Amino acid sequence: MTLPDFSASIDPAKLDKLAEVAIKVGLQLQEGQDLVLTAPLAAVPLVRLITAHAYKAGAGVVTTFYSDEETTLSRYRHGHDASFDRASNWLYDGMAKAYENGAARLAIAGDNPMLLASEDPAKVGRANKANSIAYKPALEHISNFDINWNICSYPNPSWAKLVFPDLPIEEAVRKLADAIFAASRVDRDDPIAAWAEHNAELKKRSTWLNGERFSALHFTGPGTDLTVGLADGHEWHGGASTAKNGVTCNPNIPTEEVFTTPHALKVEGHVSSTKPLSHQGTLIDDIRVRFEGGRIVEAKASKGEAVLNRVLDTDDGARRLGEVALVPHSSPISASGVLFYNTLFDENASCHIALGQCYSKCFLDGASLSQDQITAQGGNSSLIHIDWMIGSDKVDINGIRADGSKVPVMRQGEWA
């Protein structure tokens, strides 16, 4: 079967700039460093450009693993029941070994966010859990920021058609490509300089928050009255960060957030999502949850509720928070008015929280802390890390100091 090629709809010069930014800004790939790359089959044009820029930067070996929507669906259409409790452990063990040996990690996002929306949610949940368990050895190197890693995106036609359903497919791909390029700052004359300027602005925000040393954040808005306690010794980050291997990288292209670690036992109240969550091919919309003692004790959604609840049952840490992130409502991605149905983009249009695993780098001296110390300071542990959006122009945020006094952090979705 020959796949239709819509790459002619994509500006080749900007696609090349995206590849260059992924290597030079996203990863800052080092000479002699190997690279593990994953991508949808449709993203071959970007994979080829990234690979070229990687070797120009002195890469050791670039190894690419492709996913394909039709073969993914074949499992759900024809797989025997036992298949859904299996995962490719050998592959993830190999990836973990590569990261232990110093390889960098780059993922190209772009799969159809609704690919599994019509499949049996029980099978989707089982497959996701098996995959999470198998992936944990590799994921720990990423969540612990042992290595330089990055995620960027390619306008897969099936994704473009979901974002722009009323447009002809070629035009939808072109429009999504342009939105990706703008959000990724590669529509500028000098994208690398633009990223340096943007990283400096995010650094100013994280520096202010670190200076305040808030003990908690209080979110209020429609359907939301949530107090998120912050972990002991938490540290805010945003934009470029230095991994434990000494390489300064931008893990997300694009990014508009500053983020830190909540205290896993100190989240109270209720919160409603402000954008849909696309998770493993299923759309979960209108999420409403209630926390007690840091744990989600009630969860509802107008779409995808069964999948949401299976995610929450992944392990003991799946009902607790591993990240809280602040993003102004006026961010370029929000201002674009595009709903991407892709967390990499939609989380950068809105303040958000993440279920599951925390980032050890979001602690003072995090690189030297053991897992037991991170847990003692309030860091959460889980097989999952799933961001979902809770911010809008109707949400206010106060920082709460240790003495109980309050400081305006955001008003109507903007920095106060």
Image: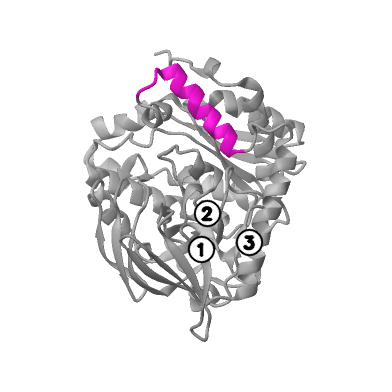
Q: Residue furthest bottom?
A: 403
**Residue at coordinates 62% horizontally, 53% vertically from top-left?**
100
Look at the image and say whether residue 161 sits in the magenta stretch.
Answer: no
Pointer 1 with pointer 2, Cβ within 8 A: yes
Q: Residue flagged by tag 2: what amino acid is it?
A: Pro
How many tags in the picture? 3
Query: Circle 2 sits in a helix, a strand or a loop, which is it?
Result: loop
**Residue at coordinates 55% horizontally, 64% vertically from top-left?**
416
Residue 274 vertical position relative to residue 180 in the rendered view, above or below: below
Residue corresponding to mark 3: 205
Q: Residue flagged by tag 3: what amino acid is it?
A: Arg
| Residue 275 - label | none
Residue corresponding to mark 2: 328
Mark 1 nearby-residue class (10 Å; few <14, some 14–19, many ≥20)? many
Mark 2 nearby-residue class (10 Å; few <14, some 14–19, many ≥20)? many
Query: Circle 3 sits in a helix, a strand or a loop, which is it?
Result: helix
Query: Circle 1 sits in a helix, a strand or a loop, which is it?
Result: strand
In percent of width and height, residue 12 lies at 63, 21
Residue corresponding to mark 1: 410
Q: Residue flagged by tag 1: what amino acid is it?
A: Met
Identify the mark nearer the N-term, 1 or 2. 2
